[in-house]
């Protein structure tokens, strides 16, 4: 099957490789000349036979919006745009509506797997109409891992990105659960070989997971994580997950705490803790650090 | 190798099976007549050649303490007691000391794997002296999963139970992260097939794990979890993990929130929320539920 | 000074009383015939001399929006609309813009004080242009408590409602801190007279506050809070505060936990805890409640 | 009434002043020569007529324990020791038992009020036998604020320190609620005058409290809290409160989060966040800070 693929960065580049390895025909476009297959979106569209399927894999937000708008100008009725980036789910229904007005079909796909997807396959969560999903199934089958898992048609437009958003919210929580446990082990006077303990959990234990495998891998490279700072960005999905928990009245202390810990990790000093320090000084005469 | 095994319940019974399947000689004792191999602790000790290795797999706390005290009366200098139950790590060093006074060696072992351990192997975290660990290695090797993972000598007496405690604290956090994400998906207007989304994460995704596999399994059996209540006991390790975080000044919002959610799940009504309701009524005249 | 006041419910009715007691001239309008001073908005506007000041004190959201739109049709250039309801701060700047197009000035005011405001005065946080604030100062002075506190010009349009939103977010946190402490005292085997302990904190202690006074008052009426359920609604500001914390990357575990506890208090059963129970059953064979 | 008072630091010194101002006779002892009234504990005991009442106001833990042990050697049957320090409540019953064996009575008193107690009075929570409490009432009356509040006989030995412990746990939560709100206001683009907003809440608002007054006071001195670090110690009671919540199965996310935030404020780098950063790097190739 033919696929136009826009955005050949860390994710898109690997996806092209995996698709090609599976025998799919991919025409990739990227603004980096070294990696692109074609010189322009026009050329990309020209190279595809109708009905075309074009997958965008560019940064969420304005770049995605702009890319899809440009594409829509070039595509024809019956073509399909798939957004596999980390767009906010609320963008999908209006976008689908806009494209539908031009006869263009739309799918939103949440893609998980990171830099390992090329090898392991990508977990795909898809939103949109069933027949359009069915039409693109060969692409999904090539990208997803072998076997029965790694793919879901989650619901209508937006359901794919929504599922990926929650996936990432969970991911924050999982990572932080391991992280807290790791810190307690590190602080303990009793446990002398923390990396060995982590390793012992990789098989047979209730907490075994791919993330745990990766933590072990990181500790193999740097047994005390001495070469990095306790600093983490967040990329949108964690925040949206908490916003959704708030909107839907779902208690979400774990995911929220994981998100807040990232915020905290990026602060040079905490205004809140300044207020606490000021209060302790005021009522108790407790010393403050200056 | 010979092993005396005391306690043949859900965990111990399976462990006996796995050990025997691996060619180890197990003499099991349990107060249930149907499952026990011997009629008494005396008989168990009699059947083992010195230096004996006896593994206790009975409920943590007084039963374990009493069992080990009785055993210590029957064993001889040079014998080894291994406690594989969920004892609190602070019990181990004093216990080892008491046993040492009689010339009996001691190991504490954290055992993870639940009812699947018989098939998958058990993750083992061991505390105690290296030579005693080495002596018992054939037992550990039979219990642990095949391959390089699933076993660690974590440190001195207590380090095994400590590692298992933190393991369980992490387990609480992991489970609750999935649980919150599950609830958000369930509450969402967009995601129509929650079990399918969970299934899609089992391969290729960043959140893939054994716990996720089990969540999928539970949803296969009961797609809306309609046949059970949102009620969960806690068995000690979660509480001790939070106590340790507090003692060691480790921020642990995720694990603590997971534990508190279990407490909450067992309350018929919340005294704290009564106080909140009373306050809202007092200052704002807001209606209360009676 | 003359004031038109729309909405004479629990808050607005008391405010009219306080304003009149302070010698201000209030024309009140409400759709309840027993309380209204005039039969219609037209009549209200007619009774006021230009430049008119009209204060809306109606439920936030569509009712406020509709009321202000209707008012704007009736008012003249140079008149002033003040929204004292719990509108979301993001409504204010667009609303001010719309009104400005008609030459009508706008202020947003966050009003705290609940049913006690009539007696104690209301804390007022104002957003808008300084000269408009100055023009309305006699109204603010009549509503606010005597003395130097209870009034702030917080910033431009929206800053009043924003400040009130954060005020309420803090209120959630304060209430829940007392509530947790109350629950611990109630659960303790040692403390025999919980209401007496609460009472002891009302003077001299670091935790003395008006909310604590009210908790004591509630316990005077019902020493074990036996006549109410642990159930609490939330009215918007708490959610917006958490949304803002998320948007601004401010760690806010306390306020978020207080909000989530309210969500929790309204759930008949917790889908998240069902997932936890299902997982425990799957890996450990732990019994579930049905 | 006569009182021996041991420990004349920030708290004890002020208490002596307040007691004397109320006409009580205080013999104070401190190891600082400038402040002590007597040269030794012996001299202190000599100066008091039986039955003696001696109040210890020294650092909790070993110093308190040692002081009380020394005192017990010097006192006679029928004398009374009052510990007003921040002892852990679990110390009280054994201590009372030990003293009772010598015929010495014991009361534990939680004292709140900080450096303001001299002026405002101290809130006192007392544990012990009613007749001993009654005997000491003149001392309590002199220390407590005027009026009906500020004193409670909370229960048997330990109940006084227990109540004070929970009081401090609540205090952590209250402070952090204000602190989070403060940080959101500071981060907001809309609110231009944060100290003015805080000031507006001091009267008429639902969040008015003594702590808020102190926050305002701190902002008067340093409007942006620029001269202090966001760093806060914790002194035991917060940790014990969380331990008690865990022991009693009371959900306490707010108090726990407040405590964890203090831990966090003292970390140069967060091992947990290092683990998160390492994981993000492993699965997504996300850049880490070094």
Image: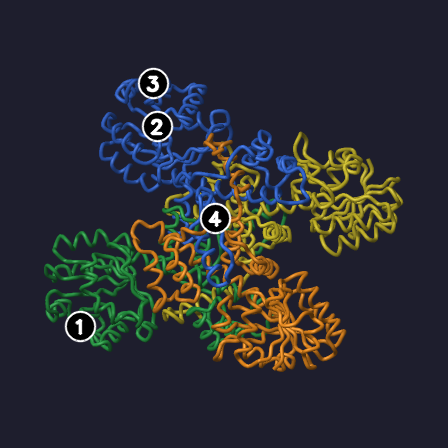
Chain colours: A yellow, B blue, C orange, D green
- Residues at marks 4 and 2, CA–CA distance in whole angstroms: 34 Å
Q: Is residue D234 above or below residue B1?
A: below
Q: Which of disc 3 and disc 4 is earlier in sequence?
A: 3
Residue D91: x and y in percent read 25, 53
Q: Cβ–Cβ below 8 Å for labels 3 and 1?
A: no
- Residues at marks 2 and 1, CA–CA distance in whole angstroms: 62 Å
Residue tagged by mark 2?
Answer: B55
Q: Is residue A226 visible?
A: no
- Residues at marks 4 and 1, CA–CA distance in whole angstroms: 49 Å
- Residues at marks 3 and 1, CA–CA distance in whole angstroms: 71 Å
Instruction: Residue A72: give its label.
Output: none
Give whichever of B78, D158 is nearer the camera. D158
Q: Is residue B66 above or below residue D290?
A: above
Residue tagged by mark 1?
Answer: D27
Instruction: Residue B257: give its label.
Output: 4
Give SS at disc 1: strand
Q: Work out which residue is located at the far front of the displayed protein and give it.
A: C34
Give SS at disc 3: loop
Give whichever of C183, C272 is nearer the camera. C183
């Amino acid at each position: 099957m033919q696929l136009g693929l826009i955005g050949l960065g860390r994710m898109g580049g690997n996806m092209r490789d995996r698709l090609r390895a599976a025998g799919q025909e991919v025409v990739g476009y990227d603004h980096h000349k070294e990696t692109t297959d074609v010189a322009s979106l026009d050329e990309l569209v020209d190279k595809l036979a109708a009905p075309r399927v074009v997958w965008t894999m560019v940064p969420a937000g304005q770049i995605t919006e702009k890319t899809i708008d440009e594409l829509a100008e070039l595509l024809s009725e019956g073509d399909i745009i798939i957004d596999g980036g980390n767009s906010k789910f609320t963008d999908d229904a209006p976008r689908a509506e806009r494209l539908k007005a031009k006869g263009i079909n739309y799918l939103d796909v949440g893609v998980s797997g990171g830099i390992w997807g090329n090898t392991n396959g990508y977990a795909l969560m898809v939103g949109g109409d069933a027949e359009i999903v069915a039409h693109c199934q060969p692409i999904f089958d090539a990208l997803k891992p072998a076997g029965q898992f790694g793919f879901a048609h989650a619901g209508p437009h937006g359901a794919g990105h929504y599922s990926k958003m929650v996936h990432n919210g969970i991911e924050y929580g999982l990572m932080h659960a391991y992280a807290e446990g790791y810190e307690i082990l590190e602080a303990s006077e009793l446990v002398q070989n923390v990396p060995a303990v982590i390793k012992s959990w990789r098989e047979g234990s209730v907490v075994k997971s791919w993330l745990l495998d990766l933590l072990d891998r990181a500790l193999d490279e740097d047994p005390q994580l001495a070469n990095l700072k306790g600093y983490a960005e967040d990329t949108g999905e964690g925040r949206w997950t908490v916003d959704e928990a708030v909107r839907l009245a779902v208690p979400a202390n774990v995911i929220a705490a994981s998100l807040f810990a990232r915020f905290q990790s990026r602060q040079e000093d905490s205004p809140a803790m300044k207020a606490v320090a000021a209060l302790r000084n005021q009522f108790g005469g407790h010393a403050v650090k200056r």
